[in-house]
Amino acid sequence: MTFAEKQQDIIDEFSLFDDWMEKYEYIIDLGKELPAIDPTKKTDDRLIEGCQSRVWLDSSLDDGKMMFTADSDAIITKGIIGLLIRVMNNETPEDVAKMDLYFINDIGLQEHLSPTRSNGLVSMVKRMKMEAVKQLMH
């Protein structure tokens, strides 16, 4: 599945809901489905700066593709990072580093988040792209 197809799937899923309360419930459900991060990876160096809640992100390169796992102590945040992982997992570091995550605007996510959560979303995207750039430098 291409990067664009993954984003389109998310846009299509969100279009099924009439209002933002239903969309928030869906994001929460996605957070509950996020595969658990290895507890030993919940370290301070994996915490994402700029997030109101605590968000841990671990990344690795597997057969030339980026693989991310994450966790958060806030269920909505966990769902949001789950969406980002869904789009960025199994993509090359080059693609992750230059990705245009247009689905965020298309589903209206950023405008429906509180300013602190919106800043956290930007921080999550930035950190995931930085992890990809680090892989490119090795």
Image: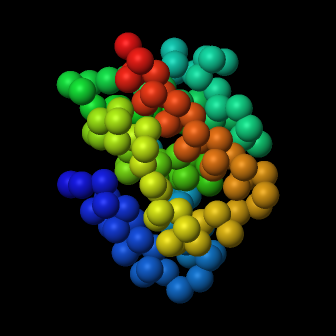
Q: Residue at x 34, y 42 (%)?
A: 95
Q: Residue at x 43, y 30 (%)?
A: 132
Is 53 left or right of 28, judged from the image as shown?
right
Is 64 left or right of 42, judged from the image as shown?
left
Q: Farthest bottom residue?
A: 18
Total number of numbered discs in the rendering: 0
| Above or below for 130 versus 96 | above
Is 80 left or right of 52, judged from the image as shown?
left
Q: Residue at x 52, y 19 (%)?
A: 41
Q: Position of residue 90 (x, y in %)?
A: 28, 39
Picture quadrant of residue 69: top left
Image quadrant where one finds the C terminus = top left
Q: Position of residue 71 (x, y in %)?
A: 55, 36
Is 101 left or right of 28, judged from the image as shown?
left
The answer to whether any part of residue 31 appears in the image is no
Q: Position of residue 13 (x, y in %)?
A: 39, 72
Q: Position of residue 44 (x, y in %)?
A: 66, 18
Q: Residue at x 70, y 63 (%)?
A: 113
- Nearer-the-camera pick, 118 or 16: 118
Image quadrant where one finds the N terminus = bottom left
The answer to whether any part of residue 19 appears in the image is yes
| Above or below for 106 versus 114 | below
